[in-house]
Image: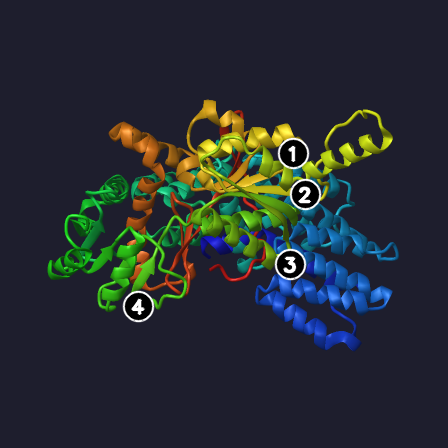
């Protein structure tokens, strides 16, 4: 089971438990009445195929047309599917439609789903309160369901030892090796996520070897994600300490396969980058990261790497020279123009990993892969997070110019796919520092002031007045570089919008604790290299800062980009796609889509006291296919 599948495993297990409980209770099952069986069967088929949003919509329609006794069944199923789609707001709406005349078992399921919604909304304490108030379950499935929810809530609270204990207790209520293995995989994924957020995975004093081994295993998994070559010795050490541990089986084998460390590299790799001219700094940072990963690998398994400066000659010349020198895999180039030229030259016999994206309408040759730090992809992830957080109506503020236009279009398009809406858009000039005019228009504060002026004039007296912003704004999305973001956030506070959740792309963040105090409250996605406090990422960053102190501060993202480019080589060479290709890199969780584009799922953080504080990952918001 691969990383993306593991990420949703706990939620899928939870919803399956609800379905089993309902199905096993007379009069409370989620199976539809016979008169609507064909439609409900289609909805169940969509759910099994992972089309959760479409399934939820169909169950909603069935509920609207069904008589009251059957309506409850459909609404419970709709709620489950909305949760599986990552749309908490729709799940709440579906559950709110449930009437009072339901069976006791349906009432229990409603409570469990209410707890699931609380957990999805980053309220683990409330989820535990709801579950704690329920009477004890009367079936093994019901007990396992409650333990799963409690375990996930404890992990969300940062209590990894208690979450682990609950998963271990849950195993006693499961039947069959498949269910047991799924429980262990879910535990491993929660430990992996906890370690990535910087949670200390230390066993309490007096813990037995089973609990201690699982907690240490979480740190091993994180090492495999971030730096698999450096993790080899730690895997051996863990196996030696815990030879009979249940994780020392298929769970570890799956993690090793997912890390790419067990895959083979070609004999010779060519790295084509601009190492002189205008793009020298960027090319040098990518090269340094690439070679850092290379030197982490065991010397006996490394390929030969030849580096070519594409700015010192024509790209075509460097490319042909790499082929003549015997390259079996090519990484680069970096700029969009050179990537387009590489696509013209690629003939498929030697795979190419281009470090930028081609235009969407461009024909992609066989064996041609693309990896980029794309702001448009980040904007789409922000849109999915906004909806997953239960916010569907908001405004955006973007800079003038082509970059702002692209980011705004990507965000608005993805939000629209998820039934959200950008109700107003403001454009600011990054050459200026006072954005009062555009903020007043965006929040309709100017309308409020005009109404006050008209009323004062009509009454002929001066009225006490406090401007009021529009009341239908659930979020503000801002696209900005760090210097502009630090100006925009205080100005939004000044203009009565400090309480509106603000989201941004990673472009807004750079490491500067003193200056970032002005960004307090801002939520954004970023690569683990920049925001994760886990031990493996910290160790790598410190090594880079020590080796290149001047370059590391300004080019950290590009260094991480080069590091992960090296790790992708065996994955791409093997030809795997989708979840089977997933690795947990320092630039994000990486997967290869059917078109050969490497997609990054980023971590989330919120600025507090000038520091990025990790947020729990949002469930997928059921978006359409990523572009």
Task: Check residue 497 in the rendering and tell me which mark sits there, or answer none.
Answer: 1
Q: Secondary structure at mark 2?
A: loop
Q: Pick whichever of labels 4 and 1 is earlier in the sequence.
A: 4
Give the residue pinned by disc 2. Answer: 473
Picture residue at 55% right of the left edge, 53% below the top: 8
Task: Check residue 16 in the rendering and tell me which mark sits there, or answer none.
Answer: 3
Residues marked 4 and 3 touching at CB (< 8 Å):
no
Disc 3: CA contacts within 10 A as few (<14), some (14-19) or many (>=20)? some
Q: Secondary structure at mark 4?
A: loop
Q: Is residue 191 visible?
A: no
Nearer to me, 207 or 77 = 77
Q: Pick whichever of labels 2 and 1 is earlier in the sequence.
A: 2
In the rendered image, residue 339, in percent from the top left (x then y), is placed at 29, 57
Task: Check residue 521 in the rendering and tell me which mark sits there, or answer none.
Answer: none
Mark 4–mark 1 distance (CA, rounded to whole Å): 48 Å
Give the residue pinned by disc 4. Answer: 365
Mark 2–mark 1 distance (CA, rounded to whole Å): 9 Å
């Amino acid at each position: 089971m691969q990383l993306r599948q593991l990420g949703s495993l706990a939620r899928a297990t939870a919803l399956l438990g609800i379905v089993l409980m309902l199905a096993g209770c007379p009069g409370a099952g989620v199976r539809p009445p016979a008169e609507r069986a064909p439609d409900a069967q289609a909805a169940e088929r969509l759910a099994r195929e992972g089309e959760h949003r479409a399934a939820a919509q169909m169950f909603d329609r069935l509920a609207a047309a069904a008589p009251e006794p059957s309506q409850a069944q459909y609404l419970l199923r709709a709620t489950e599917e909305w949760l599986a789609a990552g749309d908490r707001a729709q799940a709440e709406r579906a559950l709110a439609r449930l009437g009072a005349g339901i069976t006791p078992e349906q009432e229990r399921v409603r409570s469990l789903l209410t707890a699931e919604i609380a957990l999805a909304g980053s309220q683990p304490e409330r989820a535990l309160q709801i579950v704690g108030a329920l009477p004890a379950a009367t079936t093994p499935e019901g007990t396992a369901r409650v333990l799963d929810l409690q375990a996930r809530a404890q992990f969300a609270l940062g209590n990894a030892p208690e979450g682990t204990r609950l998963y271990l207790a849950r195993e006693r209520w499961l039947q069959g090796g498949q269910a047991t293995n799924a429980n262990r995989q879910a535990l491993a994924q929660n430990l992996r996520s906890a370690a990535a957020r910087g949670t200390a995975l230390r066993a309490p004093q007096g813990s037995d070897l089973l609990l201690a081994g699982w907690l240490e295993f979480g740190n091993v998994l994180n090492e495999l994600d971030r730096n698999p070559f450096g993790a080899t010795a730690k895997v051996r050490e863990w196996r030696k300490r815990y030879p009979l541990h249940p994780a020392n089986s298929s769970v570890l084998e799956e993690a090793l396969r997912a890390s790419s460390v067990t895959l083979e590299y070609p004999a010779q790799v060519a790295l084509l980058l601009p190492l002189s001219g205008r793009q020298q700094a960027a090319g040098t940072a990518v090269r340094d990261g690439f070679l850092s990963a290379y030197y982490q690998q065991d010397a006996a398994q490394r390929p030969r790497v030849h580096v070519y400066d594409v700015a010192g000659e024509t790209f075509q010349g460097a490319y042909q020279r790499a082929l003549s020198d015997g390259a079996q895999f090519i990484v680069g180039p970096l700029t969009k123009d050179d990537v387009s030229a590489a696509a013209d030259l690629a003939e498929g016999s030697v795979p190419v990993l281009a470090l930028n994206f081609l235009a969407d309408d461009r024909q992609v040759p066989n064996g041609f892969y693309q990896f980029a730090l794309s702001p448009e992809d980040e904007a789409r992830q922000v849109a999915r997070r906004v909806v997953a957080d239960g916010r569907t109506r908001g405004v955006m503020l973007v800079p003038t110019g082509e970059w702002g236009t692209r980011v705004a279009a990507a965000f608005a398009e993805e939000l629209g796919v998820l039934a959200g809406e950008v109700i107003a858009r403001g454009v600011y000039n990054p050459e200026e520092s006072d954005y009062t005019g555009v903020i007043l228009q965006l929040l309709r504060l100017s309308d409020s002031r005009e109404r006050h002026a008209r009323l004062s004039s009509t009454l002929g007296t001066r009225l006490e007045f406090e401007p009021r912003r529009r009341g239908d704004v659930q979020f503000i999305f801002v696209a900005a570089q760090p210097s502009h973001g630090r100006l925009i956030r205080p100005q939004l506070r000044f203009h009565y919008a400090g309480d509106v959740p603000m989201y941004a792309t990673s472009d807004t963040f750079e490491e500067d604790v003193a200056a970032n105090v002005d960004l307090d409250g801002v939520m954004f996605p970023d690569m683990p290299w920049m925001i994760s406090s886990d031990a493996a990422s910290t160790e790598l960053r410190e090594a880079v800062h020590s080796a290149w102190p001047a370059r590391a501060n300004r080019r950290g993202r590009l260094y991480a980009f080069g590091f992960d480019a090296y790790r992708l080589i065996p994955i791409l060479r093997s030809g795997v796609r989708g979840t089977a290709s997933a690795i947990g890199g320092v630039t994000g969780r990486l997967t290869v889509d059917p078109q050969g584009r490497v997609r990054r799922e980023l971590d989330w953080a919120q600025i507090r006291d000038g520091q990025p504080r990790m947020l729990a990952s949002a469930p997928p918001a059921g978006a359409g296919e990523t572009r």
